[in-house]
Image: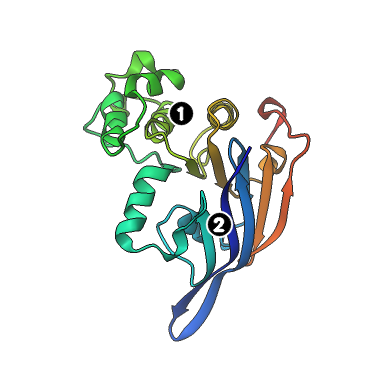
Amino acid sequence: MGIIMQARNITKVYKVGGIEVKALYNASFVLEEGTLTIILGPSGAGKSTLLNVIGGMDVPTYGSLEVEGVEVSRFTERELAKYRREKIGFVFQFYNLMPNLTALENVELATELKKNAKNPRSALASVGLAEREKNFPGQLSGGEQQRVAIARAVAKNPTILLCDEPTGALDYETGKEVLALLEKEAHEEHKTVVIVTHNSALSRFGDHLIKLKNGQIITDRQIKNPKPIEDIDW
């Protein structure tokens, strides 16, 4: 496994009413290919800020972020747009599917943005929805919609798959099914998967744990013996 991402002393400062607020302070870490990383912390810990920086939706005030040896933190808006399009796949808590498009069309929409995208039908089949490709989001359960969202993200064939509370709107059993799919993307498809969550039960799931508190990384460790998802309760 090689290093995909290197963050060095990332700090993000926002000005609120003339006061500087450090949403993220001196965050340094490494992400490797084919691994699943959990970024854990309560609301206000800096998780969303870090996700935005990794995903190219924001840039750090100080520090640097390198992806595959290229410094993303100094990209222009145009370069960031290209980075998001070519390197990043997003999975959100509330799916963000187009309601007037079928499951297959939602996935196809993402593949139009990428030259080396995967086959949309194959992506849907990989999440167990080959027989639901003609259904609209309103005809699918929450878990099925999230699986379509995962298929849409992986069909882009991204380098890094970012998942923001991907089980937050799902019931327990469906949430575990979604986590199993994301684990498969990391370990079988060799993608770098990052799951941002406040669910502390996931601290033993995956290969790498980064814990945030008050904008700072307080834990950064490899998980030597991760728990199988079927053994995790919350």
Would residue 228 be seen by someone viewing this image from the given angle? yes
Q: Which mark is residue 47?
A: 2
- The label on residue 109 is none
Residue behind mark 1: 143
Residue 211 is left or right of residue 7, and the answer is right
Instruction: Classify mark 2: residues with Cα within 10 Å, few (<14), some (14-19) or many (20+).
Output: many
Q: Position of residue 128 (x, y in %)?
A: 45, 18
Q: Circle 1 — which element?
A: helix
Q: How is the image coloured?
A: rainbow
Residue occupying the far right of the picture: 225
Identify which residue is drawn at 53% across, 35% down. Answer: 191
- Residue drawn at x 46%, y 28% as measured from the top left: 143
Three-letter residue code for mark 2: Lys
Q: Nearer the viewer, mark 2 or mark 1?
A: 2
Q: Nearer the viewer, residue 126 or 170?
A: 126
Identify whether 100 is placed above or below 216: above
Q: Residue furthest top?
A: 131
Dot placed on the residue nearer the N-terminal end, 2 or 1: 2
Could you tell me if residue 40 is visible in this image?
no
The quarter holding residue 228 reads top right
Residue 6 position, x and y percent, is 58, 55
> Please, is residue 122 above or below residue 112 in the view?
above
Q: Judge left or right: residue 204 versus residue 44.
A: right
